[in-house]
Image: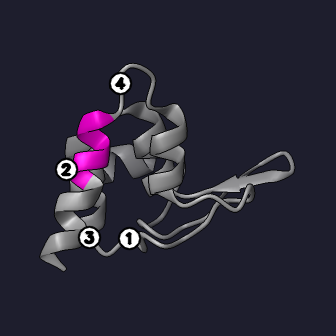
Amino acid sequence: ALVSTFLEKHGLRDVNAKKRRFLRSTYPLHLAVQEGNPRLVVAILARGAKKEQKNSLGMTAEEVAKKSNKDGSHRQVLEALGVVQQLQ
């Protein structure tokens, strides 16, 4: 329900759907990272999101998390990305 609600909120059909806004595009995993929601990051990855997918700026979700990480604000998101990577 967590992922389905999130996808619906953003008008996305699945975890690898591209969201276009003006001249930019992003993906559900990037959006979850930007929101700083580690539970959602893990859930989206568990549903098959491509961790290596890059947004229109050429950034992976991990790179977005590192860029957004101010004073540890995205530490848990980075951990979530790492934990899931180790499990795969």
User: Taking 49 as reference, is 82 above or below it?
Assistant: above
Residue 34: % across, % down: 48, 37
User: Taking 25 as reference, is 54 above or below it?
Assistant: below
Determine crowd level at label 4: few under 14, some 14-19, many 20+ residues with C-alpha closer than 10 A. Answer: few
How much space separates mark 4 and mark 1, taking CA atoms?
23 Å
Determine crowd level at label 3: few under 14, some 14-19, many 20+ residues with C-alpha closer than 10 A. Answer: few
* SS state under label 3: loop
Question: Label 4 is placed on what type of residue?
Answer: Ser
Q: Return the residue nearer the eye: 4 or 48.
A: 48
User: Taking 16 as reference, is 81 above or below it?
Assistant: above
Image-based side of 53 in relation to 83, left or right: right
Q: Which residue is mark 4?
A: 73
How much space separates mark 2 and mark 3, taking CA atoms?
12 Å
How much space separates mark 3 and mark 1, taking CA atoms?
6 Å
The magenta segment: 75-80
Q: Return the residue nearer the eye: 5 or 58.
A: 58
Residue at point 43% right, 67% down?
14
Q: Return the residue nearer the eye: 49 or 81.
A: 81
Which mark's residue is nearer the viewer, 3 or 4?
A: 4
* SS state under label 4: loop
Which mark's residue is nearer the viewer, 4 or 2?
A: 4
Q: Main secondary structure of the magenta part?
A: helix
| Residue 1 tag number | 2
Q: Which residue is mark 3?
A: 47
Which mark's residue is nearer the viewer, 2 or 3?
A: 3
Q: Earlier in the sequence, mark 2 or mark 3?
A: 2
Question: Label 1 is placed on what type of residue?
Answer: Ala
